Image (spheres, rainbow, N blue to C red):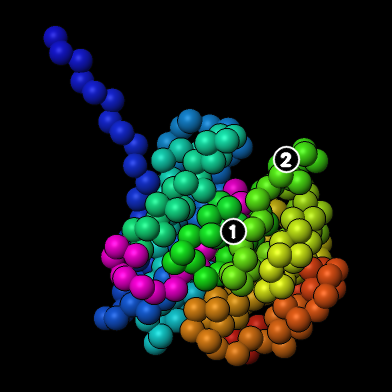
Amino acid sequence: MAQQATPVRRARLGRTVGTEPAAVSGVVLLLPGGDETSARRPSPLLAAASVRALGRRLTRAGRAEGLVAHVVHYRFRGWNGDEAHLARDTMWAADEVVRRYGDVPVCLAGVDMGGRAALRAGGHSAVNSVLALAPWLPEDDVAIAAEPVKQLVGRRVMIVHGTNDERTDPELSFRLAARVKKANRDICRFEVHSDGHGLHQHRDEVHALAEDFVMGVLFGRAFSRPVEDALAAPPPLGLRMPLASGFGRSLRR
């Protein structure tokens, strides 16, 4: 009996979050979290659940400008060392955006391991901005020092991290942001006081901050004063900007 070939795993884009506009002028790729090492296929439902609320908020805010958001479904659950599967799948997803929508700006918005994928894949030519929420980063001093940053030159970057994150040390994202700042002044980092890895305690403020950033980088809307100040401030001030309780109440839809 002939052996059946093992199906080749492929990354894919989920359906558009919300209603797709008639004309697309900007895209957000939503990058879920993952594991450090795993060859298992991620659960599409669980992956989408981790970023769907953010995607709904962003698409509501950018509907008039032609914003589309897609969840990226990875081939593997794990980063898997030098394979960097999540980052590779993010690069594929950016290529797919170009194929589908043409020359439109792309923001990579990732959580947890997806935040690391967003930062690593930020050098794609279609990407103009990166939003990393509680990004997972390697704890080894050598590994974090070797994490690449030059691909982020020319992109606007925002990192948001809870000060009580027990899964990934917020100091790691600060150290990475400080390295990025030396090559690219257009980076800021916000600290969410007393919040944990999922940023659930201040989710409304975090999503309002994400909206403020994404609408600014994709469509040229004016940033709020805290975001302007964080981008303009020298380190470490602009990389340890506190996210104020109640931020963005005037932005809520």
Task: Decide whether residue 239 is among the magenta residues.
Answer: no
Residue drawn at (51%, 48%) of the image: 87
Determine whether, in the image, residue 124 is placed left or right of residue 11.
right
Above-or-below relation of 85 to 115: above
Q: Earlier in the sequence, mark 1 or mark 2?
A: 2
Q: Is residue 48 above or below residue 62?
A: above
Marks 1/2: CA distance? 17 Å
Of residues 124 and 58, the one nearer the viewer is: 124
Q: Residues within 10 Å of mark 2 (few under 14, many from 20)?
A: few
Label 2 near label 1: C-beta < 8 Å? no
From the viewer's perspective, tell me whether residue 37 is left or right of residue 183.
left
Q: Amino acid at mark 1?
A: Gln
Give residue 154's quadrant in the image. Answer: bottom right
Element under disc 2: helix
User: Which residue is pictured at 50% across the width and 79% down the height?
Assistant: 218
Residue that label 1 marks: 151
Residue 204 visible to the viewer: no
Q: Quadrant of residue 104?
A: bottom left
Q: Which residue is mark 2?
A: 143
Identify whether 110 is placed above or below 57: above
Q: Is residue 68 above or below residue 232?
A: above
40 sits to left or right of 167: left
The magenta segment: 98-116
The answer to whether residue 10 is visible is: yes
Q: Which of 75/48 is in front?
A: 75
Residue 167 placement: quadrant: top right
On screen, residue 201 versus residue 153, left or right, reads right
Q: Residue furthest left?
A: 1
Q: Callout 1: helix, strand or loop?
A: helix
Going by the numbered disc 2, the residue's amino acid type is Ala
Residue 242: x %, y % from top left: 80, 73
